[in-house]
Amino acid sequence: MTPEICPNCGAEVPRRARACPECGADERTGWSDSAAGEHLDLPSEPFEYDDFVNREFGSRSPKPRGIHWFWWLTAVLVLAAMVFFLVR
Ligand SMILES: [Zn+2]
């Protein structure tokens, strides 16, 4: 059963349409807000997201690990180059 007007967003739904063209609600989702939200919801992983935020913007580690080892590598390479030219 396709409602003429979407109960979720109020848009007109074509009779032959199986889903609302506006919000994507359909028979499977029960034409309801929560079901449509579930239908359209992006995969959310709160724990990994928090971890990511802490790593990138958190105050626990002001210096990201990537940059830390990158500068160590740069320093070692510069020292190696200096030693190379001095020895030569
Ligand atoms: Zn709708």
Image (spheres, rainbow, N blue to C red):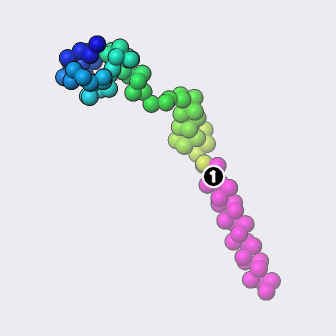
Residue 58 seen in the figure? no
Percent across and percent down for residue 15 are 21, 20
Please state the extent of the stretch shown in magenta in the rendering: 65-88
Q: Quadrant of residue 35?
A: top left
Q: Position of residue 80 (x, y in %)?
A: 75, 73
Residue reaching furthest to the bottom: 88
Q: Toward which corner of the image does residue 1 lie, by quadrant? A: top left
Q: Is residue 72 magenta?
A: yes
Does the rendering let one see residue 80? Answer: yes
Residue 22 or 59: which is nearer the viewer?
A: 22
The amino acid type of the residue labelled 1 equals Gly
Residue in view at x 53 percent, y 33 percent: 49
The local crowd at label 1, few if under 14, some if 14 to 19, many if 20 or more residues have their Cα within 10 Å, is few
User: Which residue lies under the disc numbered 1?
Assistant: 66
Q: Is residue 79 above or below residue 18?
A: below
Residue 51 or residue 29, whichever sits in front = 29
